[in-house]
Image (spheres, rainbow, N blue to C red):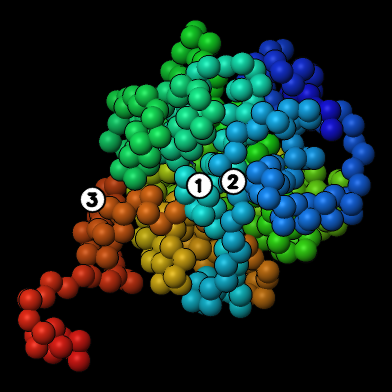
């Protein structure tokens, strides 16, 4: 379908060509989104085509993003797609996690199975493809780690130069290592995510670099495919709830937009409710939804779930719309709750990074509050791979993990390694206990 850029602000809704290099509305400064100029979609025939593509060996059909290209704004440009066979992430059940979360049943959609280990790949394949379409040679982002890992990989795959800006000392080594390995020019700035984003926006304009943060509407478009694929995997049977962690709120915006499109185009009849979970020390969206009034950022966000350590989420107006339209909720969880939920997901043989575990911690709170019912059909989206932050895991299991205020996190589900002598008898004695 033919697409254009549209101002997200309802009072403006100005329209711009899809190939204009803008991130905010030039008229009112609002956020931008991609909109389709035609509105006709044959849902039943697309469902069939998308299912058939799963068995096809063409690279674009093998991608869990580009398989759904009819609902992405790249008409006529698919031959330029930069793909690492992203998406195709599984739905996994866990009895242990369901029980912990107060549910009869739970399903995880695990985005950590992506090529660089996070959901960012779903969006980045589209963001980098747009950079190629615009003839850009350099791309940049500020990141709490995963966006930079993903951008570095896709930029290198496309032969573009990439520059990543990271908050010095506040990202996991796993993610920093990926940016280095994939060949990004890596700048560690002595500031937090929100401060660096302002800096990078200025530099991108000044140096003509294409910005690939989630204000970039093409990233959001790609992330819609997480929902397309989830519902395709469930034969278009929507769950009652989709639960996800909230940081910069790009994913919340993408999920809501995807669900609205699927409903409006006739793929699904019922809208699942979105539940967005934030970390207590970085919960400006939670505070805003709770108290109303003006949106107030958190100046010094703090959480060990560094992926969601964001105090001034740019996409909050879109997230507000999506949570409202889906009759959703926003919850916040403590460091201890995140750490324990993460260990439970690990004990299920699934595993994830700390930010992802906020989902299960949030579900436990929401079932206890009677907001989610035990029999509800719930899908929690695990956003990042277990190996993204091994340091956190080791510290938790050995009882060394401390929250940002220096308080010990209790290893309620800890699994301490044991040092043993090089002696079969001694080891046998220990194992017989
Ligand atoms: N989970 C993980 C693993 C993330 O990396 C992020 C965001 C989120 C959740 C939150 O998603 O921002 O769309 O609400 N990471 C960004 C980054 C900010 O730079 O990698 P969001």
Q: Is residue 42 left or right of residue 331?
A: right
Mark number displayed over residue 406: 3
Disc 1 or 3, which lies upstream in sequence? 1
Q: Residue at x 90, y 31 (%)?
A: 38
Q: Which residue is mark 2?
A: 85
Q: Residue at x 57, y 16 (%)?
A: 136
Q: Which residue is mark 1?
A: 115
Name the quadrant of the N terminus: top right
Q: Is residue 350 left or right of residue 35?
A: left
Q: Position of residue 411 (x, y in %)?
A: 29, 67
Q: Position of residue 5 (x, y in %)?
A: 75, 23
Task: Please determine whether, in this image, residue 79 is positioned above or below residue 26.
Answer: below
Q: Residues within 10 Å of mark 1 (few under 14, many from 20)?
A: some
Q: Residues within 10 Å of mark 3 (few under 14, many from 20)?
A: few
Disc 3 on helix, strand or loop? loop
Ligand 1 lies under 8 Å from the Cβ of mark 3: no
Disc 1 or 2, which lies upstream in sequence? 2
Task: Please determine whether, in this image, residue 187 is positioned above or below residue 223.
Answer: above
Q: Is residue 108 left or right of residue 352?
A: right
Q: Mark 2 or mark 3, which is nearer to you?
A: 2
Alpha carbon separation for disc pair 2 and 3 = 41 Å
Task: Please determine whether, in this image, residue 94 is positioned above or below residue 83.
Answer: below
Alpha carbon separation for disc pair 1 and 2 = 7 Å
Q: Is residue 182 left or right of residue 262?
A: left
Alpha carbon separation for disc pair 1 and 3 = 35 Å
Q: Nearer the viewer, residue 4 or 282?
A: 4
Q: Residues within 10 Å of mark 2 (few under 14, many from 20)?
A: some
Whether pointer 1 and pointer 2 mark residues with C-beta atoms closer than 8 Å, the reply is: yes
Whether pointer 2 and pointer 3 mark residues with C-beta atoms closer than 8 Å, the reply is: no
């Amino acid at each position: 379908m033919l697409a254009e850029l549209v101002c997200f602000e309802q009072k403006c809704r100005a329209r711009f060509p899809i190939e204009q290099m803008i991130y905010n509305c030039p008229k009112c400064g609002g956020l931008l989104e991609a909109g389709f100029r035609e509105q006709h979609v044959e849902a039943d025939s697309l469902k069939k085509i998308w299912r058939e593509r799963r068995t096809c060996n063409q690279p674009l059909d093998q991608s869990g993003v580009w398989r759904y290209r009819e609902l992405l704004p790249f008409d006529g440009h698919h031959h330029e797609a930069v793909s690492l066979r992203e998406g195709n992430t599984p739905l996994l059940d866990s009895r242990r996690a369901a029980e912990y979360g107060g549910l009869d049943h739970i399903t995880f959609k695990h985005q950590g199975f992506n090529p660089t280990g996070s959901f960012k790949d779903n969006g980045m394949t589209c963001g980098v493809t747009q950079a190629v379409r615009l003839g850009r040679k350099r791309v940049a982002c500020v990141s709490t780690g995963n966006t930079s890992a993903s951008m570095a990989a896709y930029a290198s795959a496309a032969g573009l130069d990439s520059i990543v800006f990271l908050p010095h000392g506040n990202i996991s080594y796993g993610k920093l290592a990926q940016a280095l390995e994939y060949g990004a020019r890596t700048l560690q700035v002595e500031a937090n995510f929100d401060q660096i984003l302002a800096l990078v926006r200025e530099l991108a304009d000044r140096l003509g670099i294409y910005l690939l943060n989630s204000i970039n509407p093409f990233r959001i478009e790609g992330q819609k495919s997480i929902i397309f694929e989830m519902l395709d995997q469930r034969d278009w049977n929507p769950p009652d709830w989709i639960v996800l962690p909230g940081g910069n709120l790009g994913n919340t915006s993408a999920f809501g937009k995807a669900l609205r499109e699927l409903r409006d185009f006739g793929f699904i009849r019922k809208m699942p409710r979105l539940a967005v979970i934030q970390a207590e020390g970085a919960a400006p969206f939670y505070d805003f939804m709770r108290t109303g009034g003006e949106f107030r950022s958190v100046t010094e966000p703090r959480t060990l779930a560094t992926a969601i350590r964001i105090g001034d989420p740019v996409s909050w107006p879109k997230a507000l719309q999506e949570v409202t339209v889906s009759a959703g909720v926003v919850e916040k969880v403590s460091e201890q709750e995140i750490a324990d939920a993460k260990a439970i997901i690990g004990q299920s043989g699934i595993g994830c990074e700390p930010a992802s575990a906020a989902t299960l911690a949030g579900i436990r709170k929401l079932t206890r509050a009677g907001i989610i019912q035990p029999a509800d059909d719930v899908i929690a989206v695990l956003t990042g791979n277990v190996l993204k932050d091994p340091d956190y895991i080791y510290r938790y299991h050995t009882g060394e993990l401390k929250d940002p205020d220096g308080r010990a996190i209790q290893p309620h589900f800890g699994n301490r390694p044991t040092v043993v002598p090089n002696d079969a008898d001694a080891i046998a004695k220990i194992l017989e206990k």
